Image (cartoon, coloured by chain):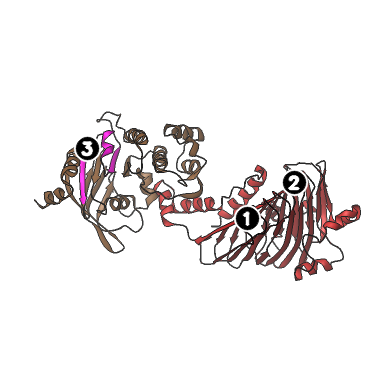
Chain colours: A red, B brown
Amino acid sequence: MSDIDQLSQEDRERLALTGLEVGMQNRCGSFFQIDQNVIQTTCGAEGIEMIPIKAALEKYDWVKDYYWNAVSRDKDKYTQYLAKQESPQGLVVIAHEGVKVEMPLQACLFLREEPVQHVHNIFIAREGSEINIISGCASSWQKEHGAHIGVTEIYVGKGAKVTSTMIHNWNPGISVFPRSATIIEEDGTFLSNYVCMQPVNRIDMYPTARLVGKNAVARFSSIVVATPGSTLDLGSRAILGAEHTSAELITRAITTGGTIISRGHILGEKDNTRGHIECKGLILKDGIVHAIPEIEGTLTGTELSHEAAVGKIARHEIEYLMARGLSEEEATATIIRGFLDVKISGLPAVLQAQIDAAIDKAESGF
Amino acid sequence: MLDISDLHVSVDGTEKLHDINLHIGHGETHILMGPNGSGKSTLLKAIMGFGGYTITSGSIVFKGQDITGMPIHERAHLGIGMMFQHPPAISGLKLGKLLAATSHLGADAIEALAQTVNMEGFLSRDTNVGFSGGEIKRSEVLQLKVQQPDFIMLDEPESGVDLENMSLMGKEIAGLLEKDVHIVNRRRSGLIITHTGYILDYLEADQGHVLIDGQIRCHGNPREILRVVKEKGYGECVRCKQM
């Protein structure tokens, strides 16, 4: 823990906002990588392993089957860059068969000095297991420029459930390129929550979930704020590749002067599949919220829908609350808080509290 | 309690209310009637201070204080409350949270008040989202019960309410207006817009006014006005002003 102890107070606070619990309260395991150095890997939960990726590839021969499987090495220049690295860093989580742990595991990726941080994570939830992973990604308060490139491959086994919550807290000069994909088997559930409410230069990501087993469920929820100078090009995609699968993509996007491109794509290619995209955008100050929902069905047995709305806060809503005694500022903040209040069913209270804390922190800036 | 003098109100550059004079004393309840589009809601919104309702001349004095240019929330703090006919639905804002934000009451006290209007099951729901007509009215009454204003404006409390709910609403509104308190000690006042007059089955009103084309044409006993309007329509009020 000595490297963690050396972190400045400012950096500790930045990390706390992404969900890092240095003292490990409410966490059953922890992985901490600063730049390219893994400084902590610890896990107290029985049946759960957290191992740096290099060690995992050496320890288990079969881990290589999951390495560059869900995400292709040749996907784009960022994955190619990562694939070229001689010394991959990142985290492998293995939840063994039937192991269910509600207390989250934390994975913290901190960009401090290096120009580029690259990470390759693999989360494997074996049959019937359940895990919650909270990934906090942040840069040091002093870090002016840099890039974070991360590949995350998630495998949700038969009847397993993975809740992945990612909270970003970067700086105005940092660019971020996560490349994630998830494969969900029969009766598996994947919940992905993404929160980014602090300034950043650019975030570019389009995670994909492939639902390959019957009754698989995927739900992506994103809560994002683009401040002036920030460009967030975000999307999520679900491929309903087995019968009785369903997916929901939910986004709440606020601009206070930055640009948000909110993409979404659901492909229904098997019978008895359902999908829905919901994107609500709020323009608080002139900026861009560009919603691009795509729904694509290839047979009669799929039912897909989307709704998108972009606008400002309705004046009559503010005045309604003012008539109850709230000042204009209080009324506005209350409505924004409500707008962002996406309660995600199945989310453990401790993760919801983390999301709420990030919203509370950002709210003071509205 | 409320003194409106020579009030002129414009909406989008068009004058909607002309030369309104209205005095509502402590403990008094007044009824405001008039055909659709005559300016009844405009008057309530101008008293509450909503944007878009420009006072071009005249004044509104509440509890001796000129509130003509005062922001909405300060009027609310002074003791003005309003029951909306068509309140906005605010997604993500739980009714219970709204009630807590607008009062100093604790969760138990709010829950107890909610039970009085059968709204305890709605505290964890988004405010007015997917509420039926009756539920919206009960939500509005609950918000007023939490807010405890001294002067309450009610915009068509009967609309969209079934008979069973009407009885509850009538009793609750009577309670808000302290109708159970002896007239000598009663402090709370009200101004109620009604089309049907059903609300008079549940509470006594002291005065009635008829608003036509942005002008108050008649004052008088509320039941008498109601009877005349029922029998002869609003045309009679137009004539009564002309005489």
* Name of the residue lying farthest toward the bottom: A77
Q: Residue A301 has which mark?
A: 1
Residue topped by disc 2: A160
Q: Is mark 2 on a helix, strand or loop?
A: loop
Left/right of residue A321 with respect to residue B158 in the rendered view: right
Q: Residue at x 76, y 58 (%)?
A: A152
Q: Which kind of residue does numbered mark 2 sit on? A: Ala
Q: Is residue A136 above or below residue A144?
A: above
- Do the residues at pointers 3 and 1 share their chain? no
Q: Are marks 3 and 1 in contact (CB under 8 Å)?
A: no
Q: Nearer the viewer, mark 3 or mark 1?
A: 1
- Do the residues at pointers 1 and 2 share their chain? yes
Give the magenta part as a residue range: B185-211
Q: Nearer the viewer, mark 3 or mark 2?
A: 2
* Name of the residue lying farthest toward the front: A300
Q: Do the residues labelled 3 and 2 touch (CB within 8 Å)?
A: no
Q: In this view, does B202 lie above or below B87?
A: above
| Real-space Cα separation, disc 3 to disc 1, in angstroms | 65 Å
